[in-house]
Image (spheres, rainbow, N blue to C red):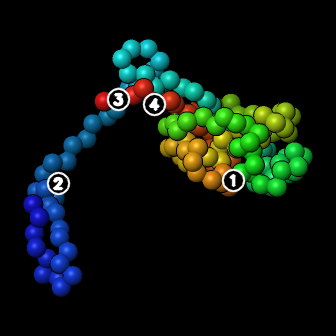
């Protein structure tokens, strides 16, 4: 129900009832993420996880970038084209990370590039590549939800 505001800027306030009159709690015990069969499909497309050890993730990623003679992470779009389409992300601390110290630098940069296009919940190929300590150390599963419709 919308109520007129007594304030001169004419703000409106909404109220659906008593403060806790319609509060419900329900535990979710299943997920559609990872389902590749049936009418609703959200298959896992990628897993991204890097282990930088005690090294600074951002400094290490930029050093690896210099080995390819690229000035900034945005140039990795050309190296790793085509970029996958938008996906949903789910944090998974149990993922086995790629050891940056011993792995192929190209694979490390590929994962760093993709992690730079992720937030905690979304992979967005249209966003700028952002390398932060948080983004480079996330352990994420990426799910294709392009066939999901509910």
* Badge 2 or badge 3: first in the primary sequence: 2
Q: Residue furthest top?
A: 37
Give the crowd class for mark 2: few <14, some 14-19, many >=20 residues within 10 Å. few
Location of residue 146 with respect to 67 vertically, above or below? above
The residue pinned by badge 1 equals 131
Question: Would residue 95 appear left or right of 101 to someone viewing this image?
Answer: left
Query: Residue visible at 63% across and 53% down?
Result: 128
* Residue 117 visible, this orientation: yes
* N-term mark: 3 or 1: 1
Asked if labels 1 and 4 touch by Cβ distance under 8 angstroms, the answer is no
143 with respect to 9 (left or right): right
Name the side, left or right, on which 110 lies relative to 91. Answer: right
Residue position marked by numbered label 4 in the rendering: 145
Residue drawn at 17 percent across, 70 percent down: 12
Q: Secondary structure at mark 3?
A: loop
Q: Quadrant of the C terminus?
A: top left
Q: Mark 3 or mark 1: which is in front?
A: 3
What secondary structure is marked by label 4?
A: loop
Q: Mark 2 = which residue?
A: 20
Residue 49, label in figure: none
Q: Considering only order in the chain, which callout, 2 or 1, is on the residue closer to the N terminus?
A: 2
Marks 1/2: CA distance? 42 Å
Q: Measuring 74% from the left and 42% from the top, which residue is drawn there?
A: 78
* Mark nearer the viewer, 1 or 2: 1
* Mark 4 and mark 2: Cα distance apart in space: 34 Å
In the picture, the disc for residue 149 is: 3
């Amino acid at each position: 129900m919308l109520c007129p505001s007594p304030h001169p800027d004419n703000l409106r306030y909404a109220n659906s009832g008593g403060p806790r009159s319609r509060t419900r709690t329900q535990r979710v015990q299943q997920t559609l993420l990872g389902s590749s069969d049936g009418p609703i499909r959200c298959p896992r497309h990628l897993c991204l996880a890097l282990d930088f050890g005690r090294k600074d993730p951002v400094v290490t990623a930029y050093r690896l970038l210099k080995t390819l003679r690229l000035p900034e992470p945005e140039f990795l779009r050309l190296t790793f084209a085509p970029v996958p389409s938008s996906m949903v992300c789910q944090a998974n601390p149990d993922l086995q990370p790629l050891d940056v110290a011993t792995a192929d630098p190209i694979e490390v940069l590929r994962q760093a590039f993709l992690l730079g296009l992720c937030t905690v919940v979304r992979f967005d190929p249209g966003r700028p590549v952002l390398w932060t300590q948080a983004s480079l150390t996330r352990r994420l599963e990426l799910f294709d939800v392009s066939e999901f419709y509910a």
